[in-house]
Amino acid sequence: MPACPAAPCTLPLVHPDLPYGYSEWMAFTNAQQTTLGHLHPVNWLYAQAAPGVYFPFFVVELKAAAGTGGTLWDAANQCAGGAAACLQALDQLNTALGAAGGQGRIPNLCYSLAIDNNLGQLYAWWKDGSTFHIQRVASYLLSDAQHFARLCACVAAILEWGATARLRDIRLAVDYIGGQRLGQK
């Protein structure tokens, strides 16, 4: 956990089973990495809601019954923590964008999937101002071929959105913030 000098406690990084986001060396240029390091005045890891993953947009928590790792309820609770960290990281980017004079905002939205041996529950999470929202999108019976196919299609669509439109918007925002920080218009 990174220490936060302005607070008496440490700021924990979440450790989801499968976080989907962006690694700084693959998704961002050197200039963008420098800007990311200045997003939060105290904690430069703020945009890393999970270790090594910037601005995660999809968190998967896997649990197994029979006492080997928890229940679907445990997975859903862990998804809540992961989603909150995802939303806070993007909120920091939107805050920095507004402080730099940017007019737009990146939609503060992420998804999570809680899975046990039998079921998968897909959630959408978003933050509006200081209020967090959750909506269960669907539940899937993993042993049913049609349910499983629908789950796979939803996951593929989320991953596609994260790798294209969302990443493009984040890069544009980071470029704008970096340009403003350097005095460029």
Image (tube, rainbow, N blue to C red):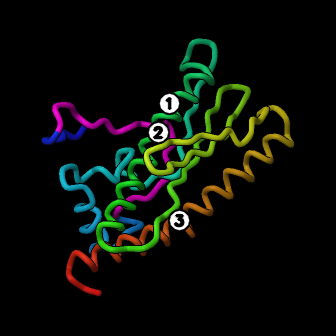
Q: Name the residue at the top extreme.
A: 67
The spot of residue 8 in percent (x, y) is: 16, 31
Instruction: Residue at 38%, 51% (x, y): give it.
Output: 89
Q: Residue under circle 3? A: 166
In depth, the one of 17 and 5 nearer the eye is 5
Q: Residue under circle 1? A: 78
Q: Which residues are magenta?
A: 7-24
In depth, the one of 101 and 162 nearer the eye is 101
Q: Residue under circle 2? A: 82
Helix, strand or loop at disc 2?
helix
Instruction: Residue at 35%, 67% (x, y): give it.
Output: 98
Residue type at numbered disc 1: Gln
Q: Is residue 133 left or right of residue 130?
A: right
Res 137 → quadrant = top right
Residue type at numbered disc 3: Arg
Helix, strand or loop at disc 3?
helix
Q: Is residue 176 left or right of residue 109?
A: left
In depth, the one of 48 and 172 nearer the eye is 172
**Is 121 part of what is drawn in magenta?**
no
Dot 1: few (<14), some (14–19), or many (≥20) neighbours within 10 Å?
Answer: many
